[in-house]
Image (cartoon, rainbow, N blue to C red):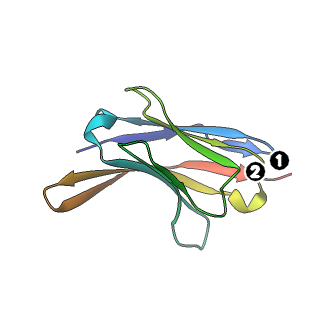
Amino acid sequence: QVQLVESGGGLVWPGGSLRLSCTASRSIDSINAMAWYRQAPGREREFVALITSGGSINYADSVKDRFTMSRGNAKIPVYLQMNNLKPEDTAVYYCNARVLSGLTVNNYWGQGTQVTVSS
């Protein structure tokens, strides 16, 4: 089991920045990958960014060059720096951890943090 808690969301003007943090109950070294997803009202949850235990990072095209995912320390293993925010970035942002157990990938989710971009 992995418990995840997101923080750092809020209300920001278009063009502004926020940094999201995700704390985990287990060391990131025991987690195969961590990711950020988001879900806007009335829309499906969508992929934002992912970092593997080896340090490889992938981004959705919609956030590339604006968002940066990074690894922190054992207590706060991942961050999501969001710059040049747009109204369409408004969503609940979720932290995701993927733990490989044999041939099964177990997914764990946080409760989400609201990001609102509005003037």
Which residue is painted at 30% across and 32% down in the image? Answer: 27
Find residue 52 and report its horizontal and vertical position in percent.
39, 47
Q: Is residue 67 left or right of residue 104?
A: right
> How far is mark 1 from mark 2, CA to CA?
5 Å
Along the viewing direction, whichever of 25 and 27 lies nearer the viewer: 27
Query: In this rendering, does residue 81 appear at all?
Result: yes
Residue 39 drawn above or below residue 42: above
Say which label, 1 or 2, has the lower sequence index: 1
Check residue 15 in the rendering and tell me which mark sits there, or answer none: 1
**Crowd class of label 1 (few under 14; some 14 to 19; many from 20; radius 10 Å):** some
Residue type, numbered disc 2: Leu
Q: Is residue 101 left or right of residue 19?
A: left
Residue 26 drawn above or below residue 40: above
Q: Is residue 6 left or right of residue 17?
A: left
Image quarter where the N terminus lies is: top left
Which residue is painted at 75% across and 50% down in the image? Answer: 85
Which residue is painted at 65% across and 56% down in the image? Answer: 64
Q: Which residue is mark 2?
A: 85
In this figure, what is the number of numbered marks?
2
Are discs 1 and 2 less than 8 Å apart at CB? Answer: yes
Residue type, numbered disc 1: Gly
Check residue 29 in the rendering and tell me which mark sits there, or answer none: none
Find residue 10 and report its horizontal and vertical position in percent.
67, 42
Q: Is residue 87 left or right of residue 6?
A: right
Query: In this rendering, does residue 95 appear at all?
Result: no
Q: Secondary structure at mark 2?
A: loop
> What is the residue that sits farthest to the left in this orientation?
102
> What is the residue that sits farthest to the right in this orientation?
119
